[in-house]
Amino acid sequence: MIDVILFLLIVIPLIVGILSFLLPKSARGICALVVTVVNFCMAVFLLKKECIVTLPWAGFGIDFSFRLYQFSGFIMLAVSFFSVLITLYSLNFLKDKDSSRQFYTYLLITLSFANGAVLANNLVVLLFFWEGLLLPLYGLIVIGGGKAFKTATKAFMIVGISDLCMMAGVALTGYLAKTLVIQDITLPLDAPGSLAFILLGIGAIAKAGAIPFHTWIPDAAEDAPLPFMAFFPAAIEKLLGIYFLARITLDLFQLNAHAGLSIILMTVGAITIIVAVMMALIQKDYKKLLSYHAISQVGYMILGIGTCLPAGIIGGIFHMLNHAMYKCGLFLTAGAVEKGTGTTDLERLGGLRSKMPVTFACYVIVAASISGVPPFNGFFSKELIYDAALERGAIFVLVAILGSFFTAVSFLKLGHAAFLGKARQEYQAVKEAHLSMLIPMIILAFVCVIFGVFNHIPINNFIQPILGENGEGHHFTGMPTNLTLVMISLLVLLGAFIHHFTAVKIMGGILKAVDHIHYAPGLSLLYQWAEKKYFDPYEIGIRLINKMSNLFWWLDRSVDWVYESLVVRVACGCSTAIRRIHAGYYVIYVVWSLLGAFLVIILFVLN
Amino acid sequence: MEYLILLAVLVPILGAFILPLIGWYAPKIRNLTALALVTISCGASALLVKPVLAGHIPTMTFPFPLGFDLILTADALGIFMAMVSSFIGMIIVIYSFGYIRHEANQNEYYLMVVLFLGSMMGIVYSQNLIYIYLFWEIAAICCWRLIGFYREREIILKADKAFLITVFGALAMLVGFIMLYNDFGTFDLRAMHGRAAPNVAVLLIMFGIFSKSATLPFHTWLPDAGVAPSPVTALLHAAVLVKIGVFAFARIFVGSLAIDPRWDHILPVVIALSALVAGGAALVETNIKRIIAYSTVSQIAFIFLGLMMKNPLAIAGGLLFILMHGLAKGGLFLCAGIVEHNTHTKDIRQMGGLIKTMPITAVSFACCALSVMGIPPFGGFFSKYMVIAGTLQTGNFMIAAVFLFGAVLTILYLFRMFNLVFLGEIKNPAVREGSYLMVCCVAVLAILSLAGGIFIRYPNQIIQATIQQLMGVR
């Protein structure tokens, strides 16, 4: 029974997704909604159940194998939860758009592949679904229209290259462990083991969108349809990426706090936090600002898991869940604003509070969550990560707290610019978003509160069991234990608040509140270069590859020149020379004959 | 059961010569007869699958003096290759009905195509080196006429170039075969099993194989051969010509002769260079058919890599690659044919936004391209994974890294092409979708590329049997 449901989880969305092309436009959304709800119900049913299914597939240890257990069931539930919300939201959001034709198809394919990737119990099966997610990723960005296909290609390339690394990692892991069954793999972190870990880790953190695999996300924020942003970079990719990172650190490789790789992971996390939040700070577009935060928050998760301490891992996974909630919620508010006003440019927005009170209320809750305001969920997961990071090194906590400060500053700026301030004349007619768009936002905001106030519900039920024996005897629920850290983070929030309002007053404009950072000496140049994409590894890589391929092209042409010119010329030259010799003058032939006779005589003499 | 082999080989070879006769009276019947000949050949090979999977190897021997015995055996490797070639050949013949419809010299076209496929059957079932050479040269002649199908001078020159390079390679190979005969006293590959070949002979035979399979530095005839009609290029790239060299490598060096271990270090470097140079050239090129041709050169290197690693997983990957690449590359060329037929240009810079006007072709092209890139759920994923994983298992990390970079180049140039041709602003507004038959053919290849990934279990059974026969392991 359970094994059949596992396959249905993959097959139903896939088949319906493809067949929904045949349906009339209006029915597609409803059809997708039904499928996602059914999927959600199945995920709820499967919760806390265990099952392993194995079917023969490609041979060589590559079996089609699924394992349902506590962790995969939980991630699957989260994935289907977000699919339901996004589908519901898109019903109205995409109603008048051409792109809705393909949107639901890709969404359902994503759901199907994500389920497959989470359930996979064989590394190649995991890779199959994991890399398969490239297709809906590309498709969902392309339907943004216009030049979106360039961003889509960029996204495909970046994630695709990291998937190639992961493929090498899978091959290496399978070779070292002599099996591809994830459940049976436990590898030591020696030299080849570390290489395998790094390669798999690249796949995981690139999916999650950490630096340096992040640069497509801000571009996609401009080009792709908004529900994509709320669904993919905000929710699904974080869930999958961090899920896999947790799996490789906990199960496959047993990373411990003494390993150098743990420091590397924490450093990647810390750099991601600070660089991305600095970029987010200066953005003047609602969606783009959010997209940089989507990158920055991954840093906390990687930092948490990288600490290799129970508190950090629990904090990291809890933060992943929380982040999916509030970032998804934030993007949905951006969508509501876009739908109402037709723009997400902060320069042109303002005073929407009275026009869209529900959206504003949701914004306040989710923005408070991401900034780490107690008692919302983000506060608790961040405190857990701080706790663990403090044990590993004060510098990491410092960076993380600095990141929180800038996060709070930028969300104060965003909320202030979009919802407060003077109401603009042109937005007099703006109305509150449609109910089907409000419901997902309200649910997300509500869950943010629940997971904050009653944080033992997710932690005890879903997250702590992941650690197994390592997690026993610890308590991560309720109020954080380290009160100094709590005080510091509260002071930082207060500081951000004061900073924002003084800066607005001094600089004389809401969006100018961060200008003293933007145009600070030294930083302004860096910002300029970053805006020109000088630091974008993708752009640099493409330039390098283009130069290299010109070299290869030249090599190819020179090989061809050998056949086209050299061989021909040599052949012509030889035949011309021979023709000259045979010109018909009998003197020449006499000379040839005499020379020949001479040679014959010499040969005879020598013999 | 043995007669099925004869049927598979002789029906297309002999039947091909009847086609022009029928063609003078009834072109339509000629077309259908051509299809029937290829289908019979494919069917005969398919019927052999069951006994071979059961462990039986049908063999026929016709003794001749001087080691010229005609030995036909249907082992798993031969059947696998025969089915891939004749099946893709079948689809290409159907596609030709639409594509060649308005051209002159159709009688010769069908004669050559069917003879070409027949000679391929001859190569895959032969166990005697001399007959492999014989069919090899028949294929070269057919390919010469087919590349020069349009009779302009420039095109004839390209056909001559292809013919000369491959024939010089084949002559070198023949010398190699004769050296083997001098050493072993036989042309029978089964009798040579496991014996060490002299290095010079290996070198000479590799000349032949690399020139036929368009590997650096003998590859430049293949992009030039793009002047042929699209179904012919599809045939060259996907079904027959370049696969001959790869197959001969598997037959001679994987399945029979033992070679000096030093070759294991030299040959992978050559093909790695080939993969990189062709991948780079594909990124610069702007002619749609030349890009796909360079892509073939680069992918052939992946197949060679798989076959060169002495590792069951890698060899299985190489063989699977032949199938998946055949389906996908065939599809790409046939799609390119539709595009080129309807836009009257081959320059990708002059195309754009064609997904609006020819959606099915565009989607099929995308599917085939994704399969070539090795993106799941398409079949190319497994072949690429197996080749890379097998290479890593033999400890060749550098080579594997170079090929991973080659895979990155593959993704890049295919996306560049897809984006320029099918996305972006519409530059050819008056273009229509290809004819029903042609679009069906590309859609079938696209669907098969997808099915090849999801139902990998079925092709894998034949490949497992092949590996078992080649290496004696499972």
Image (tube, coloured by chain):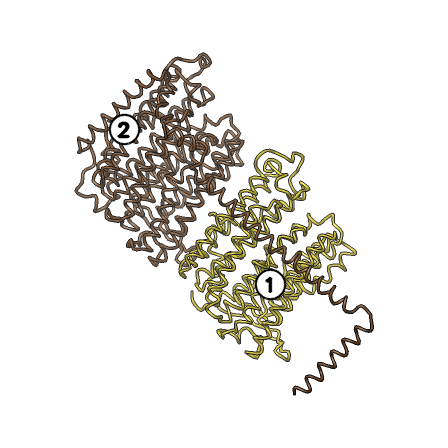
Chain colours: A brown, B yellow
Q: Quadrant of residue A607?
A: bottom right
Please provide percent x and percent y for residue A412: 33, 22
| Residue A159 percent coordinates (x, y) | 43, 42
Residue A194, image x, y percentages: 32, 52
Picture quadrant of residue A413:
top left
Residue under pointer 1: B44
The chain holding disc 1 is: B
Image point (39%, 36%), residue name? A38
- Asked whether A61 or B201 is in front, the reply is B201
- Residue type at the position of mark 1: Ala
Nearer the observer, disc 2 or disc 1?
A: 2
Residue B346 or A538: which is nearer the viewer? Answer: A538
Does the rendering let one see residue B336? yes
Q: Please state if B450 lies on the left or on the right of A237 as rendered.
A: right
Residue position marked by numbered label 2 in the rendering:
A372
Number of other residues with Cα within 10 Å of mark 2, as a class: few under 14, some 14 to 19, many 20 or more: many
Between residues A493 and B46, which one lies in front from this camera angle? A493
Classify 10 Å Cα crowding around label 1: few (below 14), some (14-19), many (20 and above).
many
Q: Is residue A424 above or below residue A180?
A: above
Q: State the CA–CA distance, disc 2 to disc 1.
A: 71 Å
Name the amino acid type tagged 2: Gly
| Secondary structure under the numbered disc 2 in the rendered image | loop
Badge 2 sits on which subunit? A
